[in-house]
Amino acid sequence: MDASPTMTTVRDTSAAPAAATPALFALALRPFQAFLRLEAASGIVLLGCAVAALVWANVAFDSYRRLFAAPLTIGVGGLVARFSVLELVNDGLMTLFFFIVGMEIKRELVHGELRTRAQAALPAIAALGGMLVPAAIFLALNAGGPGAPGWGVPMATDIAFCIGVLTLLKRRVPHGLIVFVTALAVFDDIGGIVVIAVFYGTGVRWSWLLAAAVIAAGALAMSRAQVRSAAAWTIAGVMLWYALHHSGVHPTIAGVILGLAVPARPRRRARDVIRELATHANALARAAEEEERDEAALHGVDDRLEELEAPLTRFVHALHPWIAFAVMPLFALANSGVHLAGLEAAQVTGTVAVGTLVALFVGKQVGIFTFTLAAVRVGLARIPGGASYPKLLGVSIVAGIGFTVALFIAGLAYPSAPRLLDEAKLGIIAGSLVSGSVGALLLSLTAPVQTAPG
């Protein structure tokens, strides 16, 4: 039933704010919700692969060991590279993982929760506590012993597992607290990257490091020139990986450097592109009236739409599912296999295993909770999402799930000490399991999140 223009105008004006606000809010949340769904699902796949690795290693350990120790050769003539399947996963494919990490960090710095000092302060402080206290606990138990190099192992928080647990408990965890943990994990990743680059190299070879610096400068120039070509970034990444590999710095850092260099903003302003789209839309409308198909105008629309998307966004969308559901699960399968029957009692109760477990479960929650509480008490910020202290403690415990990066650092800390590496893996798995279970239990006992009336 038609209404008069006056009545229509009044009704539209009064309804517009109410309708527009939820729509805009939903639009703003959509990328974050997609990220949570992806991380939660990948966490389940990651867990499945970790369990599969443990079962495989204890049912048929020889076949498990042979597969990942199998040699591979790539190259022709004098240019030949030889490595094992495990090295391909840990040094090669994990570079793609760190490439995504680098891009996620840059996106948060440019568009997300870390774009202002006020927004970044609280998760940065929490992450600092979540790195320093676990490292201190581990060192207190291993100082002066052969396990001391593993102090960086319990510093890591696994975002996929952590978000997976919190997503399952979303009725008990405020959205703001989930965002806080995600930002905390970003700073945690930054800390882990610094630790890997500075403390877990193999001795610096300055000529190759200089070459890596020149290539990195070239990547920065590509960023300023808004280079969109995936092929160009791939070539730059391979060159940087090769230079870092020979420099003594772990080559996976190439992924982080490249990820931070990828442009996070589109080349042109949105209003200019939209103006051109309007012109093309008019051309299409005229062609449709004349029953003609204007192929140039159709292609022009596609070209302009691509210009609205930053290279970083395009690369993340293309790579993230492969990293989440292929690279990370394969890494878990290759690195989680601990032959439990082959462990001695001294390894199960060793300082590396116990130190890792205690550092992840106790150190993470104490560091994150106390540092956050101190920042709140001095008035720096409020608890995210207006959460209660028990909810904050619960997510602090869940953040003790350290898996992917923790296993990665363990492999760097004990490259020629398989007994200590197995101890560290055991501690990582046990500490992560306890942290996830106890944190989830505590959060499940807290009051449900109050939702605003619709």
Image (spheres, grey):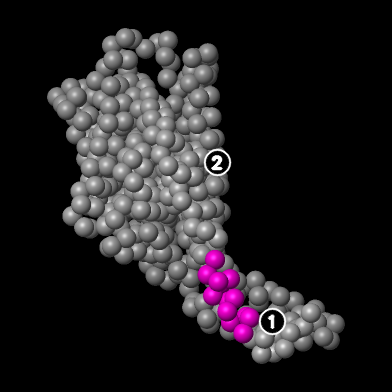
Give how far across and how far down residue 99 sits, in percent. Answer: 43, 50
Disc 1 to disc 2: CB gap under 8 Å? no
202 or 422, which lies in front? 422
Specify the quadrant that holds the N terminus. bottom right
Residue at numbered disc 1: 281
Q: Quadrant of residue 291?
A: bottom right
The amino acid on which the numbered mark 1 sits, given as a three-letter code, is Ala
Mark nearer the N terminus (1 vs 2): 2
Specify the quadrant that holds the C terminus. bottom right
Residue 27: image tag: none
The residue depicted at 28 percent of the width and 15 percent of the height is 349
Give how far across and how far down residue 344 sits, in percent. Answer: 33, 9
Crowdedness of circle 2 by 10 Å Cα count: few (<14), some, many (20+)? some
Determine if the magenta segment contains residue 18.
yes
Look at the numbered disc 2 and give the secondary structure of its residue.
helix
Determine if the magenta segment contains residue 13.
yes
Which segment is the magenta one? 10-22
The amino acid on which the numbered mark 2 sits, given as a three-letter code, is Ala
Q: Is residue 235 visible?
A: yes
